[in-house]
Image (spheres, rainbow, N blue to C red):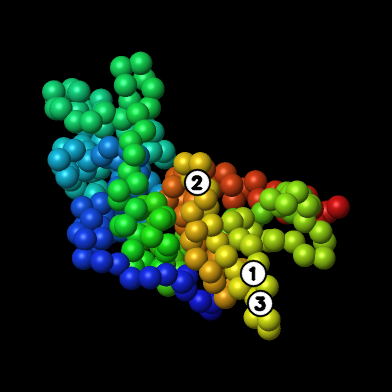
Amino acid sequence: GGGRGEGGGGSGSAAAARSSRADDDGSFGVPTYRGVWVSPAGRHFCKIDGAALAGPGKKNEGDRGDRATFATADEAARYRDKVAEKRGMKCEPNFDAAGERIVYDDSSVAAIAGGHGLESGVVPALSVINIKDLPKNVKPLLRDPKQTSRTGATNSKRYIYAYRGVCRQARKGHDRWQSQISYGGTNHYLGTFDSEWDAAAVYAWAHLILYGKEATEKAQREGEEAAEAWEEE
């Protein structure tokens, strides 16, 4: 159960922007990169001229089954740059000649998030998120019970946030749960929910999209181990 994130509606221009940065399967272009996309499962891939690049030895450009996928956006970006250079194509590169990442300012595409239950300032890749569409493989990430809060206070046994990415908003007779995630040096608001589980599940999905499957599974393992150790104390 639980409620949806609160949010406003989108405009016609936002819808047009969404179509150029979103696929029918829920994949989104990753902000600040060129030609790098992420699937709802958290796998990164790359495109040139709108077609997904096939993996080594695969022939069908644009075919989802043949596309090359990567655990991180950087890996996908390097592959795209390499393929573009090999083909002699003039594309905006993700890395300069010295191998340093070029970070593009994609603030203009923030409007893409409109109408998905998220604040308009959220990164576009997160605009796919809606608690009603939560993938079955996404579970909340357990939080280290010893982790200090932003105020510097350690969680007390009286009340421990069980999951990462959530905070309680106490209101008269009805608690609500806010979810937010940090990415690119900015905190992104993901919504306010009726249950801690819903807020945490949305955070976990955002983590999967932004940081990839490998990093999310690592965070899940670390949380489970920390929670087990806490219980044994």
Residue at image location 25% in from the left, 66% down from the top = 11
Q: Tell me the tag on residue 171.
A: 3
Q: Is residue 96 above or below residue 144?
A: above
Q: Which residue is mark 2?
A: 186
Q: Are marks 1 and 2 in contact (CB under 8 Å)?
A: no
Q: Amino acid at mark 1?
A: Gln
Q: Is residue 123 above or below residue 92?
A: below
Q: Amino acid at mark 2?
A: Thr
Residue at image location 62% in from the left, 55% down from the top = 164
Residue, far bottom: 173
Viewer-proximal residue among 38 and 115 = 115
Q: Is residue 211 above or below residue 81?
A: below
Provide residue 59's location: percent of width, then percent of height. 16, 37
Secondary structure of residue under mark 2: strand
Viewer-proximal residue among 38 and 65 = 38
Secondary structure of residue under mark 3: loop
Is 36 on the left or on the right of 118, as rendered?
left
Q: Which residue is mark 1?
A: 169
